[in-house]
Amino acid sequence: MYLPYFFFFSLLLAAASNALVQDFCVADLSLPAGPAGYPCKKAASVTADDFAYHGLAAAGNTTNIISAAVTPAFDGQFPGVNGLGVSMARLDMAVGGVIPLHTHPAASEILVVIQGTICAGLVSSFDNVVYLKTLNKGDIMVFPQGLLHFQINSGKTPALAFVSFSGQNPGLQITDFALFKNDFPTELVAKTTFLDVAQIKKLKGVLGGTN
Amino acid sequence: MYLPYFFFFSLLLAAASNALVQDFCVADLSLPAGPAGYPCKKAASVTADDFAYHGLAAAGNTTNIISAAVTPAFDGQFPGVNGLGVSMARLDMAVGGVIPLHTHPAASEILVVIQGTICAGLVSSFDNVVYLKTLNKGDIMVFPQGLLHFQINSGKTPALAFVSFSGQNPGLQITDFALFKNDFPTELVAKTTFLDVAQIKKLKGVLGGTN
Amino acid sequence: MYLPYFFFFSLLLAAASNALVQDFCVADLSLPAGPAGYPCKKAASVTADDFAYHGLAAAGNTTNIISAAVTPAFDGQFPGVNGLGVSMARLDMAVGGVIPLHTHPAASEILVVIQGTICAGLVSSFDNVVYLKTLNKGDIMVFPQGLLHFQINSGKTPALAFVSFSGQNPGLQITDFALFKNDFPTELVAKTTFLDVAQIKKLKGVLGGTN
Amino acid sequence: MYLPYFFFFSLLLAAASNALVQDFCVADLSLPAGPAGYPCKKAASVTADDFAYHGLAAAGNTTNIISAAVTPAFDGQFPGVNGLGVSMARLDMAVGGVIPLHTHPAASEILVVIQGTICAGLVSSFDNVVYLKTLNKGDIMVFPQGLLHFQINSGKTPALAFVSFSGQNPGLQITDFALFKNDFPTELVAKTTFLDVAQIKKLKGVLGGTN
Amino acid sequence: MYLPYFFFFSLLLAAASNALVQDFCVADLSLPAGPAGYPCKKAASVTADDFAYHGLAAAGNTTNIISAAVTPAFDGQFPGVNGLGVSMARLDMAVGGVIPLHTHPAASEILVVIQGTICAGLVSSFDNVVYLKTLNKGDIMVFPQGLLHFQINSGKTPALAFVSFSGQNPGLQITDFALFKNDFPTELVAKTTFLDVAQIKKLKGVLGGTN
Amino acid sequence: MYLPYFFFFSLLLAAASNALVQDFCVADLSLPAGPAGYPCKKAASVTADDFAYHGLAAAGNTTNIISAAVTPAFDGQFPGVNGLGVSMARLDMAVGGVIPLHTHPAASEILVVIQGTICAGLVSSFDNVVYLKTLNKGDIMVFPQGLLHFQINSGKTPALAFVSFSGQNPGLQITDFALFKNDFPTELVAKTTFLDVAQIKKLKGVLGGTN
């Protein structure tokens, strides 16, 4: 009696047998990526582990001057997000901790406070308006793609937040690193930012920049 | 000496004065949406409050049979995400709680466990493989767009998770609601799902479906 | 007199000689796909046959319990659609035939009835509204991406339809297959669908599921 | 016993009550469209009729010199496709009928032959290769976005085909109409096509062009 | 003899008469924009003038401290680009002129030097690499979306360049303006950039910032 | 004192060490492209030269019958634009020069006149309206994706323009080449364009077409 099913199923299976599994596309990090992401692992070798990631479970080390740590789960760390338009990161901020002014060139961000109090801000490009909010546990905030923003632990206890992105690799451009943590010639930094040479040299000293 | 700046700035401002603030597009929910989202509020009336949302701070009420609650922060609740390709929701699951089998027709999802232990699963369309994971505090998991998935509190304490989406309105289609919580004629449900009529009628009774 | 043309044409040809043929991107199925599809065959080896497909010309075998067959022309079967955002399938439905409740996770669908009478329906995620239509020869219907829908031959003769999709690989997730045609543990199916265990076991028996 | 459900459901409904129905976006043709399509009809006024269209059921009138007719079901005719990335048209071709050389500026096309024999061709932009195929009943062919193509009834009986598109409004630019069925100055047509003035004037006469 | 054409043409015209002109979507700036741009002007009122813009023909006024001017032709100035994914701007740089460090949050940029010599640079987010090039007349350079970059007139004559963007409104976030030309509290600027308070106050003085 | 920085930086660097540089994706032309473009060069081997291109600095050779030349900087010539959604070309037009009627199947175009006077036009697909503009130095014009357009040097001096595109490989389909510069059978050209056979043969003779 169940035999006739065979025809229907086998037909579908035959059709599918050389079809692509486009339900998902777990990254094969061993191959070169393209503009849309990495090539997909073969479906047969995908397991449940490819869809989960344990790397955000532990707090980042905040024993540093900014008293904060960013732990990413982008495509490079979590290949399961490849092609899906989402990724995540964990923010740990000790008392007084700060995530310095930065942008994500390729994605918008949404943040949820899990613990502590965070003062966050973003600056519009249109008219340089600064939007500031103090966020408590359970509050969420959105940071539009490409705009400068920051987070500060403004409370008296450590703060924890998770941030999600509208892309598998949002990028992270910390303004200070872009200016002072490389060989960007001091003269050019001065010319394009109006900062004093002494100020530039001081921060290059701190961050390890040269030139 | 600073006067000459005036020319440069005023030029930019003049140019910008009738330009669109496309840095962001906070939804004006009073106007009809289009395929890409809602029309934007005027920039001048946007405030920091538009980028933050407090509605996920309180736990959802889990005093119900599924012992769980989903609290969304989609474009309808949180107009600041309009056009940004992200949104969020809060999952509260009492002991034994379950988010029934469902899909998000229009977005991929990434989940982070804040408290408790969650058993989550998804089913591929290609060959109906079930991918199951038990997730603890700090673990994350990704659910590809449109695929059936579920979450169960598999621990002995309440569980809390936040989920983010790759779109401002991911949709939420709970399979049981689609089948049994409406006027979907029992005969058609039976014909298209192979479920027994008695089973259908029983669940329609529970969920308030008719026909 | 025509000689001067040479310069103009040769210039263009020289420029083009190492350019990509992005007019189209016929899939090279021997290479791993990425999120946007398969790598392209070399332009020089593309022929007219790459743009056409004969596999939908024959009726699918409907001698099975559902009295229906789906024959796909997705990227895996018809490499010419790679990168073009379209694909197609053929639906054959004997008298009483049914395409069970399913979704396409990654595309919207448009259907045209070629022969017979088809009752089709879709369920919205927003408020679980069931939209039902009876379609005759020449009628078309659209099924939005990711939403549950079905087709039934509601006439007294065989029915034939062609469906097109807004993507090269729309996916096909038949709800019954996702639940009962795999090793999805019965206990979890019960917990996430509210179905009775007996019902689940019965359908697992029919469809070949285990656990 | 079923009372507790109330809390869960009411929570979801409350959340959804001011949310957008982005499952679909049936066009409100009375409002101005934007780059992504028309504003959406209110969900409450959407009916099953919005997802179906009867306008392709009747053959187009082929009593004309080209012995052919194109009947579109784009967003303007079939508002249900708005925002879904698909649309359709019907091609009727009497014996000797031809759909003249044309492009769809905004979509790729997939064609299925329902009746008769069609010779179809497309020209690549890269190296002007002409790809020609003779298609019989059930054969399908794909025409990449923006490329010149045509269809000819090459059989001895009327031909019928349905074409689908990767967009809600693919556009249709018939080369002859663009050149000869308007006020495109003859001198400019000659200069930009190398056609003889006499040829241009002849076809302008046939197609109603001026200047 | 030409009469039969009437049927074919009238059919197409009838079909098109209530269709949208999605060939283009000239912005109606009087209506609120959405995430994809502005609503379209009615086709009947579109003229050739809508596709052209004269505002970049005149040099910007470079009599200011940076000795440079940016003149945009974004959607707000040139409504014809609405929905087309392109826009343009003109850069005038007197001797010693500089376009300060900035990003375009929503688009990539391609620049062509028309006159003079320009030193341009961009900084990657990945590892803060500075890529520097000296460009002469006819040279082009590309700046990926969202990354910090700048242009300096490094020659001994005025420089002129045109820049194009991969979007209708790329945005322009000048780092100095975001920090010093608003009411961004000095304490927060210091905390999120490590700059000295004196430096911040000095530049706020120059640029008109407060707090 | 600066030591603690080490932890913060090393954390980020460790995280990034196996991450993709999606800031940009310079094309590796030695690998096959996909629908979204070419695979990316390794970040470590990218240099400033990858972001700049010198090939448009020299005028194209206009000593030909059309007295014009198009010099492209698409992904094939300028691998730095891969994945960035922009590209460029240079138009040189001697007195009387003309860029014949053509389309770009895959991108919109924006043109800026650098020297001379150009008469440009485009034809809408909707109702075959011809939009004509005479452009002088500094004027810009936009040509929507896929629509037929042309440029003519209508002045008394050579003309120079740069055009930018909303894609890395816009394609270029010159109508005359598609019809007459290949083996498109004369009979089919006649049937699908209504052109006289003599006219077709004449232009095939000029352009090197056969059949």
Image: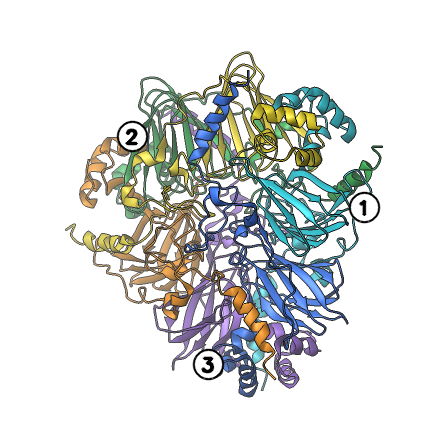
Chain colours: A green, B yellow, C cyan, D blue, E orange, F purple
Horizontal arrangement in the rendering, residue A101 relative to residue F94 (left or right) = left
Q: Quadrant of the C terminus of chain E?
A: top left
Q: Nearer the viewer, mark 3 or mark 1?
A: 1
- The image quadrant that residue E80 belongs to is bottom left
Q: Secondary structure at mark 3?
A: loop
Tell me the residue that label 3 is attached to.
Answer: D185
- What distance separates the C-alpha of mark 3 from that of mark 1? 58 Å
- The image quadrant that residue B187 belongs to is top right
Residues at badges 2 and 1 in contact (C-beta under 8 Å)? no
Horizontal arrangement in the rendering, residue E71 relative to residue D198 (left or right) = left
Where is residue F126 drawn, in percent x and y? 50, 67
Camera-side residue of A54 and D137: D137
- What distance separates the C-alpha of mark 2 from that of mark 3? 66 Å
Where is residue B27 drawn, in percent x and y? 38, 42
Tell me the residue that label 2 is attached to.
Answer: E191
The amino acid on which the numbered mark 3 sits, given as a three-letter code, is Pro
- What distance separates the C-alpha of mark 2 from that of mark 1? 70 Å
A178 versus F173 height, above or below: above
Q: Quadrant of the N terminus of chain E?
A: bottom right
Where is residue C176 drawn, in percent x and y? 69, 32
Q: Are marks 2 and 1 on the same chain?
A: no
Q: Residues within 10 Å of mark 3 (few under 14, many from 20)?
A: some
The amino acid on which the numbered mark 1 sits, given as a three-letter code, is Asn
**Which subunit holds the residue at mark 3?**
D
Residues at badges 3 and 1 in contact (C-beta under 8 Å)? no
Q: Are marks 2 and 3 on the same chain?
A: no
Q: Residues within 10 Å of mark 2 (few under 14, many from 20)?
A: many
C89 versus D192 height, above or below: above
Q: Secondary structure at mark 1?
A: loop
Q: Residues within 10 Å of mark 1 (few under 14, many from 20)?
A: some
Horizontal arrangement in the rendering, residue F102 relative to residue F185 (left or right) = left
The amino acid on which the numbered mark 2 sits, given as a three-letter code, is Lys
